[in-house]
Structures are given as C-alpha cells and as structure tokens.
Amino acid sequence: MSDHNLKDDDYWRSKLTDEEFRICREKGTELPFSGKYVDTTEAGTYRCRCCNTPLFKSLAKFDAGCGWPSFFEPLEKGVITEEVDTSLGMVRTEIMCEACGCHLGHVFTDGPQPTGLRYCVNSASIQFEEEQNKS
C-alpha cells in the first residue's frame, strides 16, 4: 500500500466527515438504501473517497437489491485489496482501496456474470465522477 495508508487518524478526520471517517477508516457500514449512490445510473467512474483512486466504472454497476451500490468487477486488477473479515460472527471478504486502505465494503459470490461477484460498496467510501460528453 502507498503512504496514504500511513496517515494518522487526525489527517483523515480533517479530510472526511464524521460519517465518512467511521465507514472509511473504522470499517463501518452505512444503513441499506441510505447511501448517495444506491440508485445512480449515470455513466462515469467511482473513485476512492480518501485518495481519489479510480475503483469502478459505471458499466460494472448493477442493482443487486441489497441497498448498497454493487459492482461485478473493479476498474482494473490491483486497485482493490481483500481481507478475511470475521466480525459480526460471520466470515466475509472485506474490500479496501489498495492505494490507501479505505474500507469500501465486502465482496460476495452471488453477483451476475461475467464474474459472478458482487462488490457491495458503501456510498460514503466512494465519490462519483460523471463522464463528460465528448462533443
């Protein structure tokens, strides 16, 4: 991981809202259907809230009905890192931004083809950059 992950809590608190800090740096979860990007359908790129790394393209977003933005694949290999999460009495796979360690959410194996994966992401962990019309 890059040096972004080595920043201390004071640094991240100065860059994020309290809710973003709770989710991105303390591995929290927003309530289902409460996030800003649950229903977003515009074309563009979803970037890490903390370090602005491009993580997902809108073409990979789908409505999983779970209450969080869901994607079937990251933008490219190496932008997402995974770790086993045994919190809440279950085994899940946590996903984080490789560049800065921002907690994004979890990945599950119940997604659509071509990958069969569902990257379930907190809206507070990402920011959307709408595609500019090329005219």
Image (cartoon, helix red, strand yellow):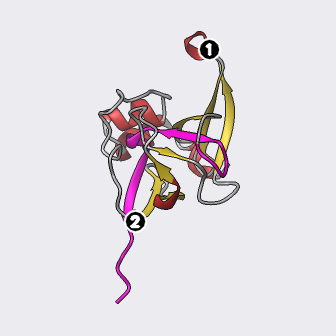
Question: What residue is at 36 percent from the left and 76 percent from the top?
Answer: 132
- Give, as a single range, the part of the protein colored magenta: 112-135
Q: Amino acid at mark 2?
A: Ala
Tag on residue 90? 1
The C terminus is located in which quarter? bottom left
Q: Position of residue 46 (x, y in %)?
A: 45, 56
Q: Amino acid at mark 1?
A: Met
Q: Label 2: which residue?
A: 43
Question: What residue is at 46 percent from the left and 38 percent from the top?
Answer: 64
Alpha carbon distance from label 2 to label 1: 35 Å
Check disc 2 and report its element: helix, strand or loop.
loop
Is residue 106 toward the left or the right of residue 39 in the image? right
Is residue 117 toward the left or the right of residue 35 in the image? right
Is residue 72 toward the left or the right of residue 52 in the image? right
Q: Position of residue 102 (x, y in %)?
A: 53, 42
Q: Position of residue 43 (x, y in %)?
A: 40, 65
